[in-house]
Amino acid sequence: MKIGNLDIENKLFLAPMAEVTDSSFRKIAKEFGAGITFTQMVSAQGVINNNFETLRLLSFSRDEKPIGVQILGNEPDVLGDAVKEIVKLKPDLIDLNCGCPVDKVVTNNMGSALLDDPKTMGKLIRKMVDSSGGVPISVKLRLGKDKGNINIFETARVAEENGASVLFVHARTRADKYESDPDWHWLKKVKENAGIPVVGNGSIFTPQDAKEMIDLTGCDSVMVARGALGNPFIFDRFNKLISTGSDPGQSNADIIRDTLLKQISYMEREFGEPNSIDKAKKNSIWYFRFYPGIDQFLEKVFSLNNLFSIRSLIEEHTQNILNGNLKVTELSEINIKFKKKVLFWLADESVESLG
Ligand SMILES: Cc1cc2nc3c(=O)[nH]c(=O)nc-3n(C[C@H](O)[C@H](O)[C@H](O)COP(=O)(O)O)c2cc1C
């Protein structure tokens, strides 16, 4: 898929996720063949205020490219100035978040609140494009405010007319948050009407889902969020499914262990040990969630308080899986727990300060 001068070969992208798509996970996703990855959303005001936490969240290394940086904002001049700062870091794409449904963001007229005001959205995009010195600007949209107010054709047209180079479309409304099934049919209609590339998003949990979304909607590429948690393997499996027609299937437990331990060492390097402990725990749960013994793993991991003991538990748990002596939890049960539980990390506190 071409975005400006950028040619992205692999069609499955890693979606931005607050508290998840840090550099450690982006690197791993890239190693497994993600087409492009994103920083989590950061506030444009925070960028121009030189807020330390904001700058840390949007920093990335050269080996992570191609990479998109995502910003939140609602004032043209603030977004323009933030874009001028961000282009100095040489990202491949700068995205305007028009999809976040979290209260703290919406009540500040940012994120998905912009869906209600396409005119302002257009002005913001225009300012970002005029300030970006040629770095492509994209927009991440939802279908509309709620099912009775779907305005994706209008917001997609406004984004394109104001110079956006690509549209990321999450096939849910703001009111849906993450709960109900997405409606992929809208993606097909948006793609048919758009003159710029369209990337579909919403409930891709397997490589087959990603292929089905492309086949059904004609989208140029697709983007996975929750389906990639602890599952960077989805990128490699999807790429192989497309290139050879067959999915190599779920990875062995020793690959899970090696990848997870590698991500934890990237994490430790990025954040230091104290700030990596909770991240290592939640990632470990995600990595092992579809494997036997997840219930026992959950019981043990929460009591640990240093990386050495987390690493040891990962080694021990992997060995137990390989020895075949752990109880298998029903997949549907894990999926229900997982879908509900993951979202507590999306609580308002996990959204970076908006100033
Ligand atoms: C933990 C979490 C954090 C998220 N953070 C962001 C974010 O920072 N920016 C954004 O545009 N979307 C964010 N999203 C939304 C995802 O990018 C994606 O649009 C949504 O989860 C739908 O994709 P999925 O059904 O594959 O999960 C987040 C989602 C989750 C689950």
Image: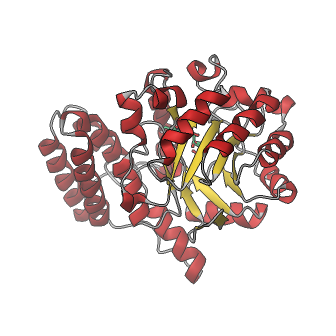
Residue 103 in percent (x, y) is at 60, 19
Ligand 1 found in image quarter: top right
Q: Could you tell me residue 91's position as x and y percent?
A: 49, 53
Seen in the picture, residue 231 relative to 123 is either above or below; the reply is: below
Res. 245 visible in picture: yes
User: Whole-percent x and y of residue 138?
Assistant: 65, 48
| Front residue of this view, candidates 72 and 212 | 72
Q: How is the image coloured?
A: secondary structure
Q: Residue at x 86, y 59 (%)?
A: 192
Q: Where does the N terminus fall, quadrant-wise?
A: bottom right
| Residue at the image point whose x is 64% and y is 48% from the top | 137
- Quarter of the image holding residue 52? top left
Question: Is residue 76 toward the left or the right of residue 346 in the image?
Answer: right
Image quadrant of residue 257? bottom left
Q: Is residue 332 visible?
A: no
Asked if residue 248 lies left or right of residue 103, the reply is left
Identify which residue, 322 or 285, lies in the foreground. 285
Q: Residue at x 19, y 60 (%)?
A: 319
Residue 282 at x, y percent in the picture: 34, 40
